[in-house]
Image: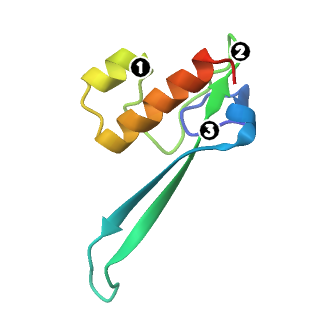
């Protein structure tokens, strides 16, 4: 499996279980009424040494430690998910 960053050698973490759900409102736009959007978040772990190909569909990517990501100003829902991921990885799941 290869995802948009070009990373392959990815495996499901957290035994493939859902890690986080973020529910947020989407305002009405054109003929589309206001509604809620559900982000279902899973933990995917990179396992390999030389598993990076060319990024696809995106530009300006980077890899960050948890602390670097939190300092970069991610929104609170992503910060929550990153903390859950870190705790899950720390506990060996």
Q: Position of residue 39 (x, y in %)?
A: 49, 55
Q: Looking at the picture, does residue 35 appear above or below residue 70?
A: below
Residue at 62% x, 28% y: name it.
7
Q: How is the image coloured?
A: rainbow
| Residue 5 lies in quadrant | top right
Q: Position of residue 54 (x, y in %)?
A: 57, 29
Asked whether, in this view, residue 83 is left or right of residue 25, the answer is: right
Q: Which residue is mark 1?
A: 66
**Alpha carbon separation for disc pair 3 and 2:** 14 Å
Q: Looking at the picture, does residue 2 appear above or below residue 45?
A: below
Mark number displayed over residue 3: 3
The first of marks 1 and 3 along the sequence is 3
Residue at 36% x, 34% y: name it.
79
Q: Is residue 59 visible?
A: no
**Alpha carbon separation for disc pair 1 and 3:** 20 Å
Residue at 29% x, 40% y: name it.
75
Mark number displayed over residue 48: 2
Q: Residues within 10 Å of mark 3 (few under 14, many from 20)?
A: some
Mark number displayed over residue 20: none
């Amino acid at each position: 499996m290869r995802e948009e960053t070009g990373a392959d050698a990815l495996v499901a973490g957290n035994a493939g279980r859902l890690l986080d759900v973020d529910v947020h409102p989407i305002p009405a736009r054109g003929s589309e009424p206001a509604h809620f959007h559900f982000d279902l978040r899973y933990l995917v772990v990179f396992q390999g040494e030389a598993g990076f190909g060319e990024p696809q569909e995106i530009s300006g990517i980077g890899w960050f430690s948890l602390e670097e990501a939190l300092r970069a100003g991610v929104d609170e829902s992503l910060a929550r998910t990153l903390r859950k991921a870190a705790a899950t990885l720390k506990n060996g799941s």
